[in-house]
Image (cartoon, helix red, strand yellow):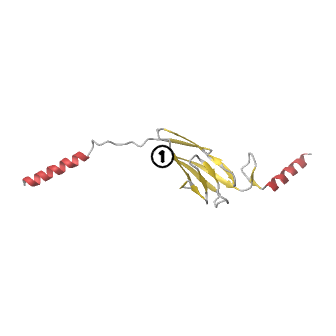
Amino acid sequence: MRTTLLILFSLIVSLAAGCGGGSSTTTPIVYVTLSPLNVDVALGTTQQFTETTSGSTNTDVTWQVNGITGGNSTYGTISATGLYTPPATVPNPATVTVTVISQANTADIANASVAIISGVRVPGAHSTVTSALWLTSKFFRTASKS
């Protein structure tokens, strides 16, 4: 009986020592912003993304394209500094997501939508045209104004 009580007492002391009293770590709330949030990127070009992280002394981030760290040849790649390079051909679907993830708290992220386009970008437009069509279109607009 005395041995049973001693074992029971040891068990209770061991359990009590494991409760409370320990140190706890709090995951910081980190704010991550990303710019630009929506962008068209033509094949053969690159797009620089800028991230800002606050709320923690650890400002390191991880970059992903469509959930793949660093991206790949299908969706495009992104460097450790946020430079996005589209793939050699337009993927299907043609829109990918660039994500920046705080390493201080991986629940804190920011996303950008990237439409990958082929052809020439027309400033101020969100459409794609080939250079031959653009020149033809410009010629007809000029001719109709005269």
- Of 141 and 35, which appears nearest the observer? 35
Circle 1 residue: 103
Q: Residue at x 46, y 45 (%)?
A: 105
User: What's the residue at 14%, 49% (across, down)?
Assistant: 9
Q: Which part of the image, by quadrant, shows the C terminus?
A: top right
Q: Nearer the viewer, residue 144 or 74?
A: 74
Q: Residue furthest left?
A: 1
Q: Mark 1 falls on what kind of element?
A: loop
* Observer-nearest of 137 and 100: 100
In the rendering, at what x and y percent does residue 32 appear?
Answer: 53, 42
Q: Residues within 10 Å of mark 1 (few under 14, many from 20)?
A: some
Is 58 situated above or below 87? Answer: above
* Image spot of residue 36 (x, y percent): 62, 44
| Apparent side of residue 59 relative to residue 121 in the rendered image (left or right) | left
Q: Percent position (x, y) of residue 29?
A: 46, 41
Which residue shows up at 72% across the image and 56% down it?
A: 118
The amino acid marked with disc number 1 is Gln
| Residue occupying the far front of the picture | 80
- The total of numbered circles placed on residues is 1
State the residue lying farthest toward the right: 146
Q: Position of residue 116 (x, y in %)?
A: 67, 55
Q: Which quadrant of the figure has residue 4?
A: bottom left
Q: Quadrant of the N terminus?
A: bottom left
